[in-house]
Amino acid sequence: MSQSLTNAQSATVHKPGSQVMVDMLLEHNVDTMFGYLGGVVLPFFDKLYDAPINFIIPRHEQGGCHMADAYARATGKVGVVVATSGPGATNLTTGLATAMMDSTPLVAISGQVRTDLIGNDAFQEADTTGITRPITKHNVIVKNPNELAQAFREAFYIAQTGRPGPVLIDVPVDMQIAQCPIPPKEKIELPGFRVRHQGHARQIGTAVKAINEAKRPVLYVGGGVIISGAGQALRDFAKKANIPVTMTLMALGAYDQTRPESLDMLGMHGSAYANYAVQNCDLLISVGARFDDRVTGALTNFAPHARVVHIDLDPSSISKNVNVDIPVVGDARQVLEAMANEVEYRPRKDWFEQIASWKARHPFQYDRQTDVIKPQSVIEELHRQTGGEALICTGVGQHQMWAAQFYKYHRPRQFITSGGLGTMGFGLPAAIGAKLACPDQTVIDIDGDSSFNMTLTELSTAVMYELPIKVCLLNNGFMGMVRQWQELFYGRRYSKSSLKNPDFARLAEAFGAVGISVHKKEQVPAAIEQMLSETRPVVADFHVDPEENVWPMVPAGKSLHEMDGLDIFEMA
Amino acid sequence: MKHILSALVLNKPGVLAHVAGMFAARAFNIDSLAVGRTDDPSLSRITIVVIGDDRVVEQVRKQLAKIVAVVKVQDFIGQDVVARDLMLIGVTCVPEKRPEMMALIEMFNGKVVDIAQKYVMVEIAGPESKIEAFIDTCRPYGIKSMVRTGTVAMARRARSKTEL
């Protein structure tokens, strides 16, 4: 045996696997994590008893996974969640798929039955790695005590390197009991995992030339800008090159929406001015976005006059949906900074005048005269009273679109929503995770009644940990977005899309939270004022117009400029 | 268009399932797939034949490369490659037909690997077209059973000028 090997062995500490797991979490600076107990994770939880980690127990593993996800989105750190084998692990799946679609860095730990029982249909056994393979960036089952520590180090590395995503480690209970080595930490080398951060200089040069030549360019930015911390780089670049910016749902906050160059959100329920700008631009500069079908509408006629520059860290995003003329594989921040150095200012007076006229003609609009509570008005009032500073989480549906349209965001990580998977029930657990991450911020879950119904058991978690989150419930008694589609495309046959709701305010009180019921338009400002001033978790239940629709809308299969509902907006 | 992709992957459990699952999830069609260890026991090579236009196959290549356990992916399109399938085929062959059958087998560079009273099993390797031709040739005699590997392939080294 060589001398160096002997030295390496003597430097290696052995501990029970459960302790190694805790040590690995601490090695990666985990101070907050989420999870639920169960038989095969008891050794690990025993070691957590003494660990300096703020541990949050949700009421359901799905909630725990969304909390860890939102914690990661609010901070940029890796979120950590643990669940037991079998049903614990399967309950994580919705949360993992949500994180996968929105590129959130997560490490999920699942317990597993003893290695000698695997494959025998043991109690609470499920093929967790098999089930989660397509909804994780990477997963691994540890069957050898020598591989436990490295599995954790690689999981944290993979989760946050390159395009982030969830990584699952499946740990059989006997691995938690076995003596496992902790080898000295070394640089992680994964032969199949290489990330190109710096864009190719020639491609950047080609992109800059196209940008300098463009008369009607648009920046179309996605969640990648927030993930890479490119908010400032985007502002600098857009300012220097003088280009308007439209954001996907995932990117809201990447660019200050109070600026005149902001075109706000584009896509199916995006602003008319953003959609017109995209359809009329001669150069579309996409940064950290993936040309989702909710953004592009009919692909054949998307940005028909434009050459397309696509900056993305993930090569598989490029030319997946839309043929790209100038691809740049690289990190959004690094590429934007490099381009900002070379790009030249152009006045583009005609283009900005055209945009200003679209903005003046087609703002987001709704009927402000009616006597019922319009959901949009609640969000506008919320924006006014919070000064646009609150951290907003949402569920999925109409309320999510209104939260995107009527609250104006100005900083990255201010808006947390399930964009890709569209997970109803994301809002409340997300608000809990975000509040833990940002205790000094006002955290509001703008939710719908149907979304809220799915995970409202987590109110109990908010009360237990004294997290003063605010649920702003836009209660229309429907699965609102489904009802809207049934109204528009199924002849108002509201098949199974309404629910009998509980009295949410009384339910909140039963949980130990504050409940507020609002039925009249004139009560809205005072209710919001009360909601914001409470020091306990609050549910403010706004009984809004049951049949209000989200406008504008690009119907499925139509092109972006073919928006319905614009006539409602025509300014007299 | 038929593309042969060659992926070097970590020789770990679940990797083949990941690759095959990705094809199914993204609605890519696999024409054939062959897996085996390489000279480095920590690595396996998966050879996948995919039919699709260039854009689809480019997306397949990128999605493969994205899998953490996939080390390297090559698309052999446009390259001079040696591509081979291997087949075992059991054919009805009464004793009086044996000379005729042996001549056919020889013609195809095949090899008899089992023989019974009214039956031969033949091993044959070669490009896919040759395998297909041999199957057609055997059909009139009666095919009892057959099994074939997917295509395996390797690019030829570029020849030096003196060789040309």
Image: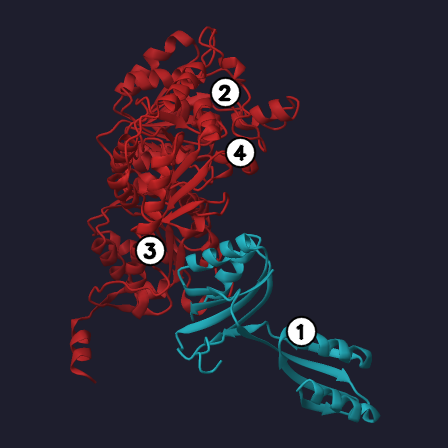
- Dot 2 crowding, Cα within 10 Å, few <14, some 14–19, many 20+: many
The alpha-carbon separation of the residues under discs 1 and 3 comes to 40 Å
Confirm whether residue A270 shows in the render. no
- Mark 1: secondary structure: helix
Query: x%, y% of residue A278?
Result: 45, 30
Q: Does residue A36 sit above or below A544 in this rendering?
A: below
The alpha-carbon separation of the residues under discs 4 and 3 comes to 31 Å
Residue located beneath label 1 in the image: B129
> Marks 3 and 2: which is nearer the front?
3
Q: What chain is the red one?
A: A
> Marks 4 and 2: which is nearer the front?
4
Left or right placement of residue A501 versus residue A537 in this view: right
Residue located beneath label 2 in the image: A476
- Mark 4: secondary structure: loop
Residue located beneath label 4 in the image: A297
Dot 2 amino acid type: Asn
Dot 3 amino acid type: Val
Query: x%, y% of residue A551?
Result: 50, 21
The alpha-carbon separation of the residues under discs 3 and 2 comes to 46 Å
Marker disc for residue A195: 3
> Marks 1 and 3: which is nearer the front?
1
Image hue for chain B: cyan
What chain does badge 2 belong to?
A
Q: Does residue A377 sit above or below A265 in this rendering?
A: above
Kindly check if marks 3 and 2 are in contact, taking CB atoms under 8 A apart as contact.
no
Query: x%, y% of residue A116?
Result: 43, 70
Please tell me which residue is depicted at 78% across the width and 77% down the height of the picture. Answer: B139
Left or right placement of residue A17 versus residue B47 in this view: left
The alpha-carbon separation of the residues under discs 2 and 1 comes to 65 Å
Where, quadrant-wise, is the N terminus of chain A in this rendering? bottom left
Dot 4 amino acid type: Gly
Left or right placement of residue A501 versus residue A11 in this view: right
